[in-house]
Amino acid sequence: MSKETEHFARGLVATIRARYRTDDFIPLHAPRFVGRDREYVLEALDSGFVSSVGRHVDAFEAALSAFTGARFAVATVNGTAALHTALLLGGVRSDEEVITQSITFVATCNAIRYCGAHPVFVDIDRATLGLSPESLDAFLSEHAEMRDDGLCWNRDTGRVIRACVPMHTCGHPARIDRIAAVCAAWNLVLIEDAAESLGSLHQGRHTGLFGRIAALSFNGNKIITTGGGGMILTDDEALARHAKHLTTTAKQPHPYLFIHDEVGFNYRLPALNAALGCAQMEVLRDVIERKRALAEYYAVWFAETYREFVREPAEASSNYWLNAFLTDDRDERDFILEYTNTRGVMTRPVWTPMHSLALFRNFQRAELPNSEWIEARLVKLPSSVPPD
């Protein structure tokens, strides 16, 4: 590797350590407990309501609804469960198809397969790292048709294309208004994978509010955490009721009988996790402000190098969940990943594209030049809230 690249990598490590003010190991994204986390969890313990009932679950849902502007929020045990439920609520059934992006975490495609459906991959935008509305429209124009039943059919496979699942990568909003317009034209249900984008806005509107339904995640490495947890967002009251019903094993209310009216799931968030979430929500705005300041710190440093720091897209305000930059090529990417990680500074590439994994390799896909270009170059940086 060139001396210039070695010099850059050495400077990158020094810059990260200077901001975090430590010679110890620096993780990619650590949870932060500075509020009333312990108090609320102990309160839940003392109440005796530690499973999926109790005031903390309701309070956490209300806090998410108020923060995002969604009319309804339904808490689930993790983000994958939220997305699986969202797909079912969106009408996705076995042997149908769901269009998504290849650059995403595997949970997106796993949830599609849980429904017995087939993922179809289209390209991303380089600027947003999210699903490209042009690639989506071009794929549909070439391979799909609207039939008299009002459904979108894939002419190649003979299957119904039921839904589209864009993902807001690293917290940066996709061009979701354009994606929504394409989905409306082709009668596709828009389901947003907003797992990483709590606190991110597109055109002043929170991610997750542009489609019929959305899924959030509160895993240990997310911008706020409940340890494990997820949330379904929707403005549709009937969908919200059905979401809560499905995620509580589809049990009908009754004083003592166990009557279940459809196949349901044990997906509701426990109150212990929800209590932690309530405390985390109280500091969320401060967390976003500090993470945006960290992104600016990185941006200033990268401006003095020739490498591109990934900034929030046009018309967007990002939570900068994970900061990232672009290397020249795969060889440089791999050198920097090796250099930083062996020196106690965690960096990561973007996920292996789904179409490259053996379990998804044989599903239909569009041409994916941007996905492959980004995968060869992107490096994620430590993005925990740094010390004051």
Image: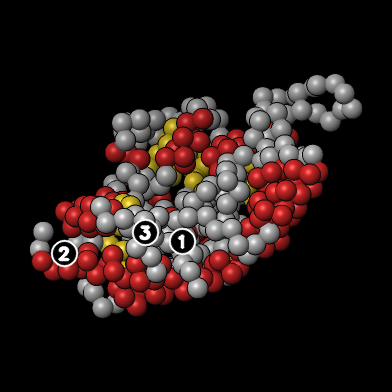
Measured from the top left, where is residue 142 in percent x and y?
35, 45
Residue to which mark 1 is pinned? 384
Q: CA distance from mark 1 to mark 3?
A: 14 Å
Q: Is residue 260 left or right of residue 154?
A: right
Q: Measured along the vertical axis of the image, is residue 359 above or below residue 288? A: above
- Per the image, label 2 sits on a secondary structure element best described as helix
- Residue type at mark 3 is Asp
N-terminal of the two: label 2 or label 3?
A: 2
The disc placed on residue 24 is 3
Q: Given contact means CB atoms under 8 Å apart, are the residues at marks 2 and 3 in contact?
A: no
**In which quadrant will I find the N terminus?**
bottom left
Label 1 Cα crowd, 10 Å radius (few <14 / some 14-19 / many 20+): many
Q: CA distance from mark 2 to mark 3?
A: 21 Å
Q: Residue furthest front?
A: 23
Q: Is residue 126 left or right of residue 174?
A: left
N-terminal of the two: label 1 or label 3?
A: 3
